[in-house]
Image: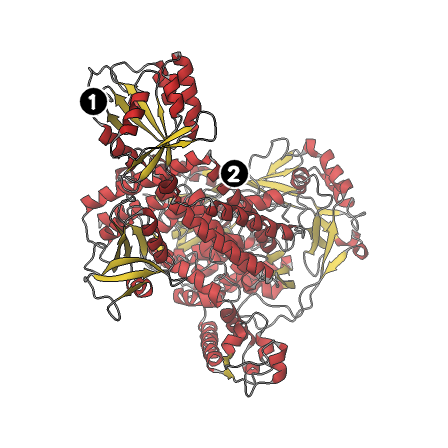
């Protein structure tokens, strides 16, 4: 069969228009690349296939980082969110995280609109069935209807679509998502090329008809007032917010689940893919925690103009009759109607240890993978990888070095390093506990960490960058001021002193010293600091955190400094581990399998001892 | 291996030498000299000039020992870094106390071969020399690993495992509270965080107090002479006990047949196990004698596996050899004065072998040296790490862990935020990890998922 060559040649082709694909295509186009985005369904751009929410622990951090680098996700949720909350407000500044409910349809429509307005970006509906590869380098893609699109670089963001298989009870059928076709052929070709392809599973709950929910019997959960935006560029959010509702399963619900297990594709062994432990189906929860007499769910609205509700934590692959009986066993849902049934989906992923830290594949030059194809789950994880793949593809087109963020720079760096160094066997989700420098990687300082890089690659607009530079200067100036301003015992307000147990103070204290005390906040300091009122809240927050946590922050910075040499030492790609004296067989085998790019990566592979890293560093040095 | 901090170690062999040298290398060397050495000259030490003074314990101000010190400024030193050498009196305890004073200034205990590694990295020695270092690093760390495995069966690592599990558990609870704020994590778990870490702290304290590394030299090590009947165990024992330079004492044991004879080898006391048994079993039926020996093996720090050079390696020898799996031992081929009929099995390649003759006394000096080397700093004689080093490592790591847990508990009592509590716990786990192996974030997540029904 002859292929039709499309007349135009691109710099970057992005396959897939989910959260990874959108960021990748926008980044590439914004960085000046002629870009093409191909998707199976143009009406499903940036569709939230599972829960209608953005952010959460570690995920909110990712969104802020994406925003700081010049990505779109933060702006998009700020523009379409219907409820905003900050989680973990009392557990410390680094683990504070933003979360928002989205209006699902508005979210995708706004993203589509932004993409359509983007110069140098074309959107086309097509199913990609293969790659054009010449001499271990990608040249373009082939679509199902026989069109060949050529490009310098290709980014695969296939989500759950590669050999997607949907399960409802013992019934299953091919699909990329309920209502969409799967992508067939691509993963076969990837395997032929030599990629290790595995199978994962995920699931989603039913969507419930809000007209049949008795909200009077449920506990509402409201957003914060005023809502705090995700994006550093959003001034304020003034849309009214709508609540979620909390409901609980009960013993009867669990009995119903158990009664359907003989028709569960999971428990009967029909599903082979590995599912995420942090997002178990309700049958998993009931079976694994038999002593728990109830499980919590949040009923999340899917939008302002729809009656569809998403019951979080209640995904299932049990048959539809069990689904009805189960959801109706919950208080408040006695008469609920299901609008879309719950289902599980199995899909192919490509083990991410086959990637460089730039997300380029080790096997095929100029080919990048981002999102669920790398074994991750979550919109934010996908968007973050999409952004980095887009940036790095564009940098390659421009003949520039890739942008690789370190583990001490960003959650994005932690995630990508985890993926490419260790691979993954279950869907990978970001947790704050994965970051060893957690205190440094806060939502509040994402701009201080990453704006410079975003601007450097050309993604952060000048006006946004200017505002950032000004903020950074004000933070510096305010720290100086607090260091230089003193509270003199002779002139101090006695009420203030007694309020903080400092009556009888002998020596002058700087405002910095005062702020370091756990009981004195910036707010409190204003009682004696007449100039504090003029300091913008974002600067106040930064100054307060930097001063209060200085000791711990410095400890982590010290650790970062210690590991810098390892992280910065590259292992030559052609290094022959077998020729290095002194490596044990076990270590050698591990290194040959994972082929780390740096000594830092090598040191994180389980079983690679510090001594082995020492030997490697000697061997690299000896090569000169 | 991080190579830019300051490291220290005792550089002379452990034992009762006349002099002991503590070597310090790295940017803080000069500052350490200022802090802990009191000397006649005012101000800083002059580079490459010996100076008389005394070492001061930085925490108490007490004098530790009279010393000679020399500071060698970079690059004119062995490592091409600033190097401080402190020469103090010999003997295990004195050198260790001087080292402790240095470590108390925030210096890290050097890894095996690390001074040489630095010398190479800084271009002081060439690759041929460096490759020798690689072998040293490797043999020592892998031997340390096998020691750890060996000890895993013992009480020590069992305890350490409990410490680690307790800390992991506490950390998993803290992390669950942090990472899953929307899931209904059991509030009762909060009390458990404190209980688990207190328990870990208690265990560490107990280990530290009973785990004085000077023990090896003060109390000695237990040595068992094993072999089938009539290979000369008894004569070997007598030879060792009658060695002129040995100090021989008899210590009445607490149980029936344990009369311990102590042999002093270059300051290292060897407690000879089951001397009575050896004498008795020489003349009972062979199988029975071998069986009795087998029972004693687990108690010994070192086994002298005696073979008869005049007889082939037989099933009884093999049975004993099998029982020595995972044990530190030296092969002693007796009757080397006779015609050799013994052919050693291939599995004994790499194990230290000493040929002796109890009849002529030949080889006994070599055997004493081999026994000494098996335990004391310097050369590992078999594939195993010596007790003294790994113990001081363990001690170091546990002391660090203890400090971290104390900080954690203090912060917990002060209602410090969870994210800072997690830092303290992670530091504690990291310290314990230096002995037991690291705890990865995945290990902690595993625990969270086992324990809590989490997810949405």
Query: The disc numbered 1 marks a residue on which chain?
Result: B
Whether residue B318 sits left or right of residue B433 in the image: it is left
Front position in the image: B238 or B33: B238
> Label 2 marks which chain's residue?
A
Label 1: few (<14), some (14–19) or many (≥20) C-alpha neighbours in 10 Å:
few
Residue A559, given in percent of the width and then of the height, sits at 41, 58
Q: Look at 66% across and 34% down and name the residue there.
A: A264
The residue under label 2 is A199
In the picture of the structure, the residue carrying the numbered disc 1 is: B360
Mark 1 to mark 2 CA distance (whole Å): 72 Å
Of residue A40 and residue A616, the one placed in the foreground of this image is A616
Expressed as whole percent of the image width and height from the top left, the position of residue B289 reads 40, 16
The answer to whether residue B417 is above or below residue B323 is below
Residue A370 visible within the image: no
**Considering the image in quadrants, where does the N terminus of chain A appear?**
top left
A387 horizontally vs A177: left or right: left
Residue at the top extreme of this rendering: B285
Using the rendered view, name the quadrant where residue A268 is placed: top right
Q: Secondary structure at mark 1?
A: loop
**Residue under the point 63% across and 57% down:** A104
Task: Determine crowd level at label 2: few under 14, some 14-19, many 20+ residues with C-alpha closer than 10 A.
Answer: many
Q: Nearer the viewer, residue A174 or B10?
A: B10
The x, y position of residue A180, in whole percent, is 59, 45
Whether residue B314 appears in this view of the structure is yes
* Badge 2 element: strand
User: According to the image, what is the colour scheme of the structure?
Assistant: secondary structure
Name above or below for residue A442 compared with residue A40. below
């Amino acid at each position: 069969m002859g292929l039709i060559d499309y007349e135009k040649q691109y710099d970057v082709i992005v396959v897939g228009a989910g959260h990874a694909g959108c960021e990748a295509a926008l980044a590439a186009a914004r960085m000046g690349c002629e870009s093409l985005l191909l998707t199976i369904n143009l009406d499903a751009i940036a569709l939230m296939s599972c829960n209608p929410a953005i952010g959460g622990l570690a995920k909110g951090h990712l969104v802020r980082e994406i925003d700081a680098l010049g990505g779109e996700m933060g702006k998009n949720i700020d523009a379409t969110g219907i409820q905003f909350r900050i989680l973990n407000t009392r557990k410390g500044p680094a683990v504070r995280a933003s979360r928002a409910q989205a209006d699902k349809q508005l979210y995708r429509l706004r993203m589509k609109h932004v993409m359509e307005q983007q110069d140098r970006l074309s959107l086309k509906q097509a199913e990609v069935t293969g790659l054009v590869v010449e001499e271990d380098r990608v040249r373009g893609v082939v679509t199902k209807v026989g069109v060949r699109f050529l490009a310098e670089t290709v980014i695969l963001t296939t989500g759950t679509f590669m050999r997607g298989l949907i399960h409802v009870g013992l019934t299953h059928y091919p699909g990329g998502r309920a209502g969409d076709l799967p992508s067939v052929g691509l993963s076969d070709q990837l395997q032929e090329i030599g990629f290790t392809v595995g199978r994962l599973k995920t699931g989603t709950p039913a969507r419930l008809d809000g007209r049949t929910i008795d909200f009077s019997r449920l506990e509402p959960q409201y957003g914060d007032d005023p809502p705090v935006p995700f994006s550093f560029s959003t001034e304020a959010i003034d849309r009214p917010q709508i609540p979620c509702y909390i409901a609980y399963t009960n013993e009867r619900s669990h009995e119903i689940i158990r009664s359907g297990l003989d028709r569960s594709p999971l428990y009967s062994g029909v599903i082979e893919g590995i599912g995420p432990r942090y997002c178990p189906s309700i049958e998993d929860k009931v079976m694994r925690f038999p002593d728990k007499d109830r499980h919590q769910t949040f009923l999340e609205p899917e939008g302002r103009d729809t009656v569809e509700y998403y019951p979080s934590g209640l995904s299932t692959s049990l048959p539809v009759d069990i689904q009805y009986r189960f959801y109706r066993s919950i208080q408040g849902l006695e008469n609920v109607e299901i609008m879309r049934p719950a289902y599980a989906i199995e899909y192919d992923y490509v083990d991410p240890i086959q990637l460089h830290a730039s997300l380029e594949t080790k096997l095929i030059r100029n080919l990048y993978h981002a999102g669920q194809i790398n074994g991750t789950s979550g919109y934010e994880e996908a968007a973050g990888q999409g952004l980095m793949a887009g940036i790095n593809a564009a940098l390659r087109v421009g003949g520039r070095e890739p942008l690789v963020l370190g583990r001490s720079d960003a959650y994005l760096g932690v995630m990508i390093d985890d993926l490419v160094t260790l691979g993954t066997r279950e869907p990978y989700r970001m947790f704050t506990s994965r970051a060893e420098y957690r205190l440094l990687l806060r939502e509040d300082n994402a701009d201080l960490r990453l704006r410079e890089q975003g601007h450097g690659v050309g993604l952060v607009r000048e006006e946004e960058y200017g505002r950032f530079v000004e903020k950074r200067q004000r933070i510096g100036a305010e720290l100086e001021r607090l260091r230089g301003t003193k509270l003199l015992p002779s002139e101090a307000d006695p009420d203030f002193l007694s309020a903080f147990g400092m009556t009888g103070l002998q020596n002058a204290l700087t405002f910095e010293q005062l702020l370091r005390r756990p009981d004195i906040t910036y707010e409190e300091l204003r009682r004696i600091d007449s100039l504090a009122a003029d300091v913008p809240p974002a600067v106040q927050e930064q100054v307060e955190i930097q001063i209060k946590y200085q000791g711990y922050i410095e400890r982590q910075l010290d650790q970062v400094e210690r590991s810098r040499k390892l992280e910065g030492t590259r292992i030559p790609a052609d290094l022959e581990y077998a020729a290095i004296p002194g490596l044990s067989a076990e270590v050698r085998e591990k290194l040959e399998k994972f082929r780390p790019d740096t000594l830092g990566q090598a040191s994180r592979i389980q079983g690679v001892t510090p001594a082995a890293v020492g030997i490697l560093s000697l061997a690299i040095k000896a090569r000169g | 291996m991080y190579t830019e901090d300051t490291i220290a170690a005792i550089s002379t062999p452990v034992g009762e030498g006349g002099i002991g040298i503590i070597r310090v290398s790295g940017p803080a060397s000069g500052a350490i000299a200022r802090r802990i050495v009191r000397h006649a000259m005012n101000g800083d030490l002059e580079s490459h000039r010996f100076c008389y003074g005394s070492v001061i314990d930085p925490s108490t101000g007490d004098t530790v020992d009279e010393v000679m010190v020399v500071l060698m400024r970079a690059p004119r030193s062995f490592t091409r870094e600033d190097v401080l050498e402190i020469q103090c009196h010999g003997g295990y305890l004195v050198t260790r106390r001087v080292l402790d004073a240095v470590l108390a200034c925030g210096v890290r205990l050097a890894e095996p071969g690390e001074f040489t590694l630095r010398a190479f990295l800084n271009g002081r020695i060439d690759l041929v020399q460096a490759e020798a270092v690689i072998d040293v690093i490797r043999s020592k760390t892998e031997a340390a690993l096998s020691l750890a495995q060996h000890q895993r069966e013992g009480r020590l690592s069992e305890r350490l495992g409990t410490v680690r599990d307790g800390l992991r558990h506490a950390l998993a609870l803290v992390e669950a509270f942090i990472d899953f704020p929307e899931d209904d994590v059991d509030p009762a778990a909060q009390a458990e965080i404190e209980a688990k870490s207190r328990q870990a702290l208690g265990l560490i304290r107990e280990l530290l107090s009973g785990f004085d590394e000077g023990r090896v030299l003060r109390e000695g090590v237990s040595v068992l002479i094993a072999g089938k009947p009539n290979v000369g165990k008894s004569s070997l024992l007598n030879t060792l006990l009658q060695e002129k330079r040995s100090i021989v004492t008899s210590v009445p044991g607490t149980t029936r047949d344990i009369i311990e004879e102590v042999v002093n080898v270059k300051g290292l006391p060897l407690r000879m196990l089951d001397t009575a048994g050896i004498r008795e079993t020489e003349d009972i039926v062979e199988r029975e004698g071998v069986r009795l020996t087998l029972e004693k093996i687990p108690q010994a720090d070192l086994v002298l596996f005696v073979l008869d050079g005049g007889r082939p390696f037989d099933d009884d020898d093999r049975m004993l050899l099998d029982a020595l799996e995972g044990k530190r031992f030296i092969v002693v081929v007796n009757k080397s004065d006779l015609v050799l009929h013994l052919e050693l099995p291939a599995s004994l390649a790499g194990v230290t072998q000493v040929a002796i003759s109890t009849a002529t006394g030949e080889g006994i000096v070599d055997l004493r040296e081999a026994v000494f080397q098996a335990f004391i700093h310097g050369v590992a004689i078999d594939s195993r790490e010596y007790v003294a080093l790994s113990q001081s490592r363990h001690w170091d790591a546990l002391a660090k862990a203890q400090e971290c847990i104390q900080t954690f508990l203090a912060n917990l009592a002060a209602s410090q935020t969870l994210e800072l509590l997690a830092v303290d716990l992670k530091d504690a786990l990291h310290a314990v990890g230096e002995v037991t192996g690291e705890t990865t974030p995945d290990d902690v997540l595993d625990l969270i998922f086992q324990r809590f029904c989490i997810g949405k």
